Amino acid sequence: MPFTPQEVEVHLEQLEGWEMEEERWIIRKFTFSSFMKGIAFVDEVAAISEAFNHHPFITIDHRTVTLRLTSWEVGGITGIDIKEAAQYNEAFDKARG
Amino acid sequence: MPFTPQEVEVHLEQLEGWEMEEERWIIRKFTFSSFMKGIAFVDEVAAISEAFNHHPFITIDHRTVTLRLTSWEVGGITGIDIKEAAQYNEAFDKARG
């Protein structure tokens, strides 16, 4: 069972920068000082998502990387999305120094 | 001056897999046997686009990487987009072995 939208909102209070989209995705945009710093972040995101075996939808628009997470198999947001988003935030905070 | 749509079509005949979109972008989807192979390709794409100082819009949807190119400054497709697309195709052909 996915979280209800209300449950997702409670989790998002602990997740800097993430928002719900269409009650089915959580999304965050990460902006970097250069294109290549964004690419290095995408490499970190890839390693994390391989470890979870759960892959975000990624877009790279010059210096902005957008990540969208959902649990397709249940049609909504679950604990794995929330845990993974927290790890992306940690990686981002590290990348910024 | 950007190429006319007719000029773009002539160039695309030499560029396997690329199509025009909204007369302003050229686009190609590249599919890989794994998520991480797609990520390795994105790293190659990044290096090429840094060399050109001209960055594509990139999306990564599990094993599928989509690249979109345009020359914003002239509002259409120019020779740099065509040359860069050709290098992405070479990188893809190499990645597939």
Image (cartoon, coloured by chain):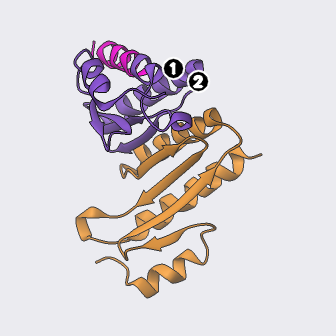
Chain colours: A purple, B orange
Q: Quadrant of residue A32?
A: top left
Q: Quadrant of residue A3?
A: top left
Q: Measured from the top left, where is residue A95 in percent x and y?
A: 33, 17
Judging by the rendered image, the residue that carries numbered circle 2 is A50
Give the Cα separation between the discs numbered 2 and 1.
Answer: 5 Å
* Residue A48 disc label: 1
* Callout 1 crowding tier (Cα within 10 Å): few <14, some 14–19, many ≥20: some
Magenta stretch holds residue A53: no
Q: Is residue B44 above or below residue B92?
A: above
Please report contact status of discs 2 and 1: CB closer than 8 Å, yes or no.
Answer: yes
Q: Nearer the viewer, residue A25 or B92?
A: A25
Chain letter behind tag 1: A
Q: Is residue B89 above or below residue A24?
A: below
Chain letter behind tag 2: A
Helix, strand, or loop for circle 2?
Answer: helix
Q: Is residue B18 above or below residue A33?
A: below
* Residue B35 disc label: none
What predominant SS class does the magenta segment belong to?
Answer: helix
* Callout 2 crowding tier (Cα within 10 Å): few <14, some 14–19, many ≥20: few
Q: Nearer the viewer, residue A25 or A38?
A: A25
Question: Residue most toward the bottom?
Answer: B6
Residue at left offset 60%, top offset 78%: B13
> Magenta residues?
A84-97
Magenta stretch holds residue A88: yes
